[in-house]
Image (tube, rainbow, N blue to C red):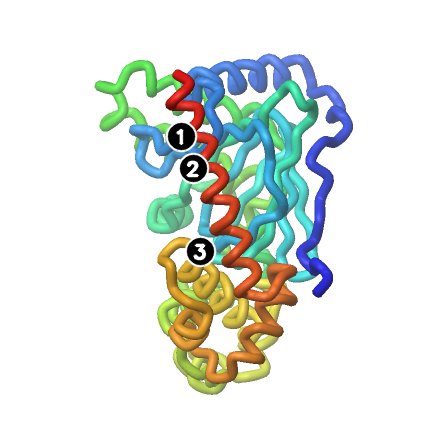
């Protein structure tokens, strides 16, 4: 079966230079993330709640994941995120905001083989964002209709400065409990008033269409293995079926059925690769009654049939363990 997973180049041309002030801030961001990660591959959860930093020296192929509400910023390299048939690209000149849970396919890319991908993620607190929106002193901004739950905006110093201050707090851990919540609140404020901030406001506005869809998404995440009844979902969020369909696709770029299918397949893959489940058990646990249908849809999404995917992953894991064992013996 041909690989249907979208392939993205891992090394791209150098980005257009930033303005001097932004470039100086970017270089500090690179230095801060390098100091935290020490150049080692992977994601690190920092002592600041909800703040993660990433370093990737050798990007793998595209990865499927559930994008949760978060603010993503890149210091070096770039990233492509596919949602449905749409592709969002961000780099040191741009940041990404996701306001609802979305099944996506993404891949990081290097600017140079000698420079790792460096970035960070800050989880969004929709409660805190809601508090800001209810503050009468928040500058007015035109309301936006229900729209994609993810967007990319151009970076600006008012957004970047508090991010740097948040990272600097890691040098003084005793300041984190008091200072970090204030700095995070400032970042959320900047996201609301900068760029496409009107989209972020929609998720926290009481009874907005976007908030209703977010509630439906939360319910779907919990009940993804059950049969999908659009009428029940629409009724639960006080919308007509046609309005629910329209706004669900406006936010997620896919239908409720497509969304459920991606959740099911991602969870089945996790069970097979990470929890050791066999193919039939994983398929049944996420709601598939037909093994052949599961195999077809799995192959379309991940590029290979489920059993071959599991065997490949096990072989790669065994090879990595052998390499680590050889390295430890040599040491």
Q: Does the CB distance between marks 3 and 1 fall below 8 Å?
A: no
Secondary element at image label 1? helix
C-alpha span from label 2 to label 3? 15 Å
Around disc 1, counting alpha carbons within 10 Å, would you say few (fewer than 14), some (14 to 19), or many (20 or more)?
few
Q: Nearer the viewer, residue 52 or 270?
A: 270
Q: Residue at x 49, y 61 (%)?
A: 266
Q: Is residue 82 above or below residue 39?
A: below
* Residue contact between numbered discs 2 and 3, judged by CB atoms under 8 Å: no
| Among the two numbered marks 2 and 3 on one chain, the one whose residue lies closer to the N terminus | 3
Q: Which residue is mark 3?
A: 273
Q: Is residue 109 left or right of residue 210?
A: right
In the drawing, does residue 182 fall left or right of residue 6? left
Residue 38 in sight from this viewpoint: yes
Q: Are marks 1 and 2 in contact (CB under 8 Å)?
A: yes
Res 237 seen here: no
Q: Which quarter of the rendering shows the C terminus? A: top left
Measure the C-alpha gap from mark 1 to mark 2. 6 Å
Q: Nearer the viewer, mark 2 or mark 3?
A: 2
Q: Tally the marks.
A: 3
Q: Quadrant of the N terminus?
A: bottom right
**Residue, disc 2:** 321
SS category of the residue bearing label 2? helix
> Badge 3 local density, few (<14 within 10 Å), some, or many (20+)?
some
- Residue 177 got which mark? none
Which numbered circle lies on residue 325? 1
């Amino acid at each position: 079966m041909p690989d249907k997973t979208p392939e993205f180049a891992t090394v791209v041309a150098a980005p257009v230079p930033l303005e001097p002030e932004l470039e100086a801030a970017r270089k500090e961001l690179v230095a801060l993330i390098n100091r935290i990660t020490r150049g080692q591959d992977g994601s690190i959860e920092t002592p600041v709640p909800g703040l993660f930093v990433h370093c990737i020296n050798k990007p793998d192929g595209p990865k499927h994941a559930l994008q949760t509400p978060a603010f993503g910023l890149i210091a070096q390299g770039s990233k492509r995120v596919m949602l449905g048939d749409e592709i969002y690209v961000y780099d040191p000149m741009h940041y990404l905001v996701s306001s609802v849970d979305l099944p996506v396919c993404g891949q990081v890319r290097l600017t140079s083989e000698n420079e790792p991908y460096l970035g960070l993620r800050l989880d969004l607190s929709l409660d805190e964002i809601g508090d800001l929106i209810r503050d009468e002193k928040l500058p007015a901004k035109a309301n936006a209709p229900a729209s994609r739950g993810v967007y990319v905006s151009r970076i600006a110093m008012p957004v970047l400065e508090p991010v740097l201050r948040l990272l600097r707090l890691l040098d003084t851990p005793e300041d984190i409990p008091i200072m970090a919540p204030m700095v995070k609140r400032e970042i959320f404020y900047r996201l609301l008033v900068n760029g496409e901030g009107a989209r972020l406001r929609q998720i926290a506005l009481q009874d907005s269409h976007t908030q209703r869809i977010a509630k439906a998404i939360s319910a779907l995440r919990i009940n993804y293995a059950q049969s999908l009844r659009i009428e029940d979902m629409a009724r639960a969020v006080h919308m007509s079926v046609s309005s629910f369909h329209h706004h669900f696709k406006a936010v997620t770029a896919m239908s409720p059925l497509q969304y459920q299918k991606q959740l099911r397949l991602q969870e089945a893959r996790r069970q097979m690769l990470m929890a050791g489940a066999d193919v039939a058990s994983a398929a049944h646990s996420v709601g598939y009654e037909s093994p052949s249908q599961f195999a077809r849809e799995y192959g379309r999404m991940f590029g290979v049939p489920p059993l071959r995917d599991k065997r490949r992953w096990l072989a790669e894991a065994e090879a990595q363990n052998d390499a680590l064992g050889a390295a430890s013996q040599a040491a």
